[in-house]
Image (cartoon, rainbow, N blue to C red):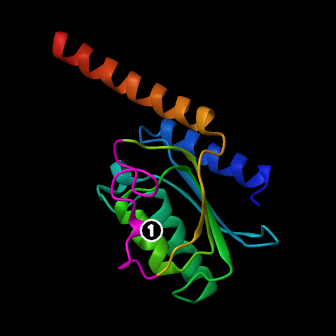
Amino acid sequence: MMDDIIFKIAFQLAQEAYKADEVPVGAVIFKTGTHEIVAQARNRTEETHSPLAHAELLAIDEACRRLGQKRLVGYSLFVTLEPCAMCAGAIAWARLDNLFFGAYDPKSGAVEQGASVFVHPQTHHKPHIQGGIEAERCGNLLSDFFQKKRSRQNQSTIG
């Protein structure tokens, strides 16, 4: 099971993303069993001008580089938002043991919503999945972010 420290770090990363005007998502990769953190990241798509700079992908890349391996067997991921199809695919390719996530994403999620990547027989690996961890708290941060973003957009079109 994922512990509170992992969640707190991921949520802090999501808050950092929020402050940087990025979609507030944070991700932490840790050793299954010991909870030793090997990588952490937040969304950086605006900063890097890359649609690939999702928190999950950045954390997976950092963990693989740090460990010197292309697979993350024996490791787990916690992310504050249900992964999209791109990130779910990367999770499968990385062979992560467990996927824990916070808020459900009915619009772009692809784990328990939409594409449901892990139910397809073409998916080579399916991690153990537990969603909805601190879902309300994670969801409120995202809702607040998008509400403020829409408000700023409306103000700029009025003025």
Residue at point 74%, 58% (across, down) = 2
Dot 1 amino acid type: Phe
* Figure label count: 1
- Point out the residue furthest to the right here: 34
**Does 118 sit above or below residue 148?**
below
Residue at point 45%, 58% (across, down) = 111
Q: Give percent across and percent down for residue 40.
A: 61, 62
Q: Give percent across and percent down for residue 18.
A: 49, 37
Does residue 58 appear anywhere in the picture? Answer: yes
Q: Which residues are magenta?
A: 107-124
The residue carrying mark 1 is 118
- Quadrant in the rendering for residue 77: bottom right
Q: Give the overall secondary structure of the magenta segment.
A: loop
Does residue 159 appear anywhere in the picture? Answer: no
- Quadrant in the rendering for residue 29: bottom right
Secondary structure beneath dot 1 equals helix
Q: Split into 4 quadrants, where in the image is the C terminus?
A: top left
Q: Split into 4 quadrants, where in the image is the N terminus?
A: bottom right
Residue 116 magenta-highlighted: yes
Q: Give percent across and percent down for residue 50.
A: 30, 59
Residue 53 magenta-highlighted: no
- Point out the residue furthest to the bottom here: 69
Would residue 143 appear left or right of 80 to someone viewing this image? left
Residue at point 17%, 16% (across, down) = 157
